[in-house]
Image (tube, rainbow, N blue to C red):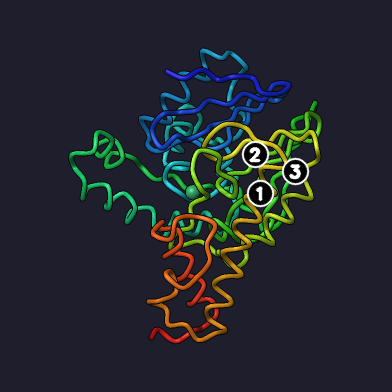
Amino acid sequence: MPDFVEVADRVWVARYEWADANVTAIGSERGVVVVDTHGSTAAGRAVMDDLRRLGAGAVHAVVNTHWHWDHAFGNAAFREQDPDLPIHAHERAAAWLAERGEETKARWLEHPQDPHAAEVAETEIVLPDRLFTSTRTLDLTDRAVELVHAGRGHTDGDLVVRIPDTDVVLGGDLVEESAHPWIGPDSRPLEWPATLDAVLALIGPDTLVVPGHGVAVDRTFVQTQRRELGLIAESVRRLVHSGVPRQEAAAEGAWPWETDDPRIANAVARGYGHLGAPAR
Ligand SMILES: [Zn+2]
């Protein structure tokens, strides 16, 4: 069972093996703010157990950095403890979870041999209820926590969490350390680089950046990831502009990652769609 490790003043991160997911606990006089809830109700209960062992106080609020299952499917476990617990998220994250949550669960049932399939099937999807569009500040008396939607990228409803008094930024999946950032069918690869520029404005030379997956990183790491995503966006734009057919784009383009990485195919599909290129 992973322990919550204090990475900065009253900021603890637990890194769970399943999906290599990070859950962050932010301590305050008002209680603990939990950022992301892992991938099922059972997994969320395990997070609650780990929080109890940490002993930093009762949970005051939950934040979902975006709608993906490995960040939001544990929500029900927190509501079991407190039916009125506020769950904060971007309005688009709540919309996606409402529209696609059950479909995501159903996809797990296509792989019944997966050791986590049953617990995902049993998960009740609980939607965030405190929604915002651009920014929100959580006033925790002795500290403030800022939720910032810096633009579209990994999804169209990502938020980053900034804890100004201790110079920590939680990047959600706009930044990943243990793998390349995931470009999926719901990503906005052409907008992601500019979104990371806005996130970088919140990151100083000494800021600790906790990614959605993997160990904490720094400004230089985020700049590198921004450059890679920028290369992908520029490559897609160039291919569309040159009239390269969509099916040849992955082979023709210049990419910072392996050409057969599914992220590249998704970036091409999303980018061509975004730019209105014909599906030749
Ligand atoms: Zn994600």
**Element at badge 3?**
strand
Q: In this view, does 179 lie above or below 29?
A: below
The residue singled out by tag 3 in the image is 137
Which residue type carries mark 1? Answer: Thr
Of pointers 3 and 1, the one earlier in the residue sequence: 3
For the C terminus, give its image quadrant: bottom left
> Of residues 279 and 96, which is closer to you in this image?
279
The residue singled out by tag 1 in the image is 224
- Residue beneath the point at 61% across and 18% down: 57
**Element at badge 2?**
strand
Taking 215 as reference, is 11 left or right? Answer: right
Q: How crowded is mark 2: few (under 14 residues within 10 Å), some or many (20 or more)?
A: many
Taking 48 as reference, is 225 left or right? Answer: right
Q: In this view, does 235 lie above or below 155?
A: below
Given this view, does label 1 or label 2 mark the residue nearer the observer?
A: 1
**Element at badge 1?**
helix
Residue 124 in the image, given as x and y percentages of width and height: 35, 42
